[in-house]
């Protein structure tokens, strides 16, 4: 849980730093790569492969093949994902949610979305309950703005809904020893005891549908790979409680606009927040790190490097379709386009996206209540 300033890769739920080697993460975390066979099966079932799958932005999984097999045999699954409300949502957070929406649409799946105001209160030394509660509401608007179905989406606010979750959290907690939790999460003597219990709370929604309907329902968790430690513990406990192990599909991190590193709220100048005024977002894009050369002449002659360019990464993760991205890569490599022009193109897209998203966020205030979890309507 300590800060790490070196290039060494650190990926935990609280810290992502260094150069991320995704193949190594698959090995170290013991997950599986997304194979062409799995993608083919999804394509067959949905008729349409999401760009985040085609581009391997979602790159790793556990038991996704099993989820598909159950689905093919007529057993529906629920989706589960979430947010720790410590501040405004940035567009990196939206990537797994956009993908989750695709899964909801294509598989008709119910979504449990957990907002962990408890986790954020416990984690941030300077937080009272006021900050995470405020951001819980604000962040929920971002989720709703993405167009999730109100009758298939249940937003759980931990401190509000703990009554419905507490018994299950206790049953989970009883099967996780301190030594396991310390090994998985890196807890130290100075860690407060609230955080020691918290992993049981994040495990609950993986079993909630099964507990509420009284029989086992498969659960698939789409999220970036930083959340994986929680699922290792959750999966260990599942058979002890008689539940299915939840499946996961993991995505890469949308980078920040600086040189390397994931988009992170702790570096606001290189993150685009969904509530940023569009002009501010434009400014951030115009100062982004690119893979350009020192001079225009050099760039025309030698081309630039899209693989280290944050502007290219944004287009790749979130905005451009396949033919546009191919064309951009070609033009970048061959020196046909200058970084300033590229930034302008992205800035326009980001601005348009923000204007539309912010309108939808405003509208979300009117039907916010419809999305809230109520144990009676499980
Ligand atoms: P949080 O708020 O840190 O992150 C919310 C979601 O965004 C993902 N994420 C990113 N995805 C792509 N690019 C990035 N730069 C990036 N940064 C963060 C995270 O993986 C996550 O999916 N403890 C959790 C809240 C939570 C949760 C869950 C998350 C509770 N239950 C179930 C996922 C699934 C948290 O603080 O997430």
Image (cartoon, rainbow, N blue to C red):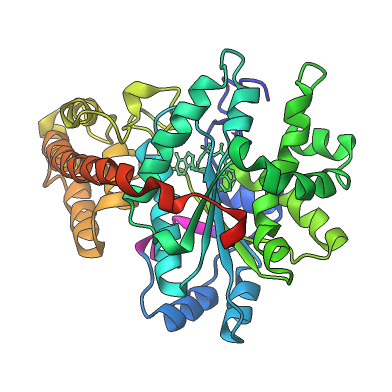
Left or right of 239, for residue 46: left
Left or right of 11, for residue 265: left
- Name of the residue lying farthest toward the top: 126
54 inside magenta stretch: yes
Is 270 located above or below residue 140 in the figure?
Answer: above
Can residue 230 be spotted in the picture? Answer: no
Q: Position of residue 163 (x, y in %)?
A: 69, 43
User: In what quadrant of the picture does the C terminus appear?
Assistant: bottom right
- Name of the residue lying farthest toward the bottom: 73
Q: Quadrant of residue 256?
A: top left
> At 58% across and 80% down in the image, what residue appears?
71
Q: Position of residue 247 (x, y in %)?
A: 64, 63
> At 41% across and 78% down in the image, what residue appears?
46
Can residue 148 be spotted in the picture? Answer: yes
> At 37% across and 49% down in the image, what residue appears?
144
Foreground of the two, 9 or 353: 353
Left or right of 216, for residue 317: left
Left or right of 369, for residue 220: right
Q: Position of residue 249 (x, y in %)?
A: 56, 59
> At 61% across and 59% down in the image, what residue appears?
376
Foreground of the two, 57 or 122: 122
- Name of the residue lying farthest toward the front: 376
For the magenta stretch, what is the residue range? 51-59
Is 99 located above or below residue 18 in the figure?
Answer: below
């Amino acid at each position: 849980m300590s800060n790490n300033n070196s290039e060494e890769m650190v990926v935990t739920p609280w810290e992502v730093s260094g150069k991320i080697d995704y193949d190594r993460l698959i090995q170290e975390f013991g997950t599986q790569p997304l194979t062409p066979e799995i993608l083919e099966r999804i394509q067959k079932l949905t008729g349409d492969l999401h760009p985040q799958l085609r581009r391997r932005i979602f790159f790793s999984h556990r038991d996704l093949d099993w989820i598909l097999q159950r689905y093919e045999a007529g057993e529906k699954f629920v989706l589960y994902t979430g947010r720790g409300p410590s501040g405004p949502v940035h567009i990196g957070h939206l990537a797994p949610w956009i993908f989750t929406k695709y899964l909801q649409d294509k598989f008709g799946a119910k979504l449990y979305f957990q907002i962990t105001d408890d986790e954020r209160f416990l984690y941030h030394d300077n937080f009272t309950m006021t900050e995470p509660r405020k951001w819980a509401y604000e962040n929920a608007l971002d989720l709703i703005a993405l167009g999730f179905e109100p009758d298939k989406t249940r937003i759980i606010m931990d401190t509000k809904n703990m009554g419905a979750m507490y018994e299950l959290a206790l049953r989970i907690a009883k099967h996780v020893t301190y030594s396991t939790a310390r090994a998985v999460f890196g807890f130290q003597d100075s860690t407060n005891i609230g955080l020691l219990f918290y992993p049981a709370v994040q495990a609950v929604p993986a079993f909630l549908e099964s507990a509420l309907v009284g029989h086992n329902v498969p659960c698939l968790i789409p999220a970036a790979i930083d959340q994986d430690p929680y699922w290792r513990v959750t999966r260990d406990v599942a058979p002890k409680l008689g539940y299915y192990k939840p499946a996961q599909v993991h995505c890469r991190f949308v980078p920040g606009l600086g040189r390397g590193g994931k988009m992170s709220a702790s570096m606001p100048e290189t993150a685009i927040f969904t509530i940023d005024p569009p002009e501010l977002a434009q400014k951030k894009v115009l100062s982004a790190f690119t893979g350009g050369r020192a001079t225009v002449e050099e760039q025309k002659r030698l081309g630039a490097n899209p693989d280290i360019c944050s502007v290219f990464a944004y287009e790749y993760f979130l905005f451009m379709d396949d033919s546009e991205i191919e064309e951009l890569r070609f033009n970048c490599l061959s020196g046909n386009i200058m970084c300033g022009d590229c930034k302008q193109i992205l800035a326009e897209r980001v601005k348009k996206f923000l204007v539309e998203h912010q309108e939808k966020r405003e509208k979300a205030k009117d039907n916010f209540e419809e999305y809230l979890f109520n144990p009676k309507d499980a």
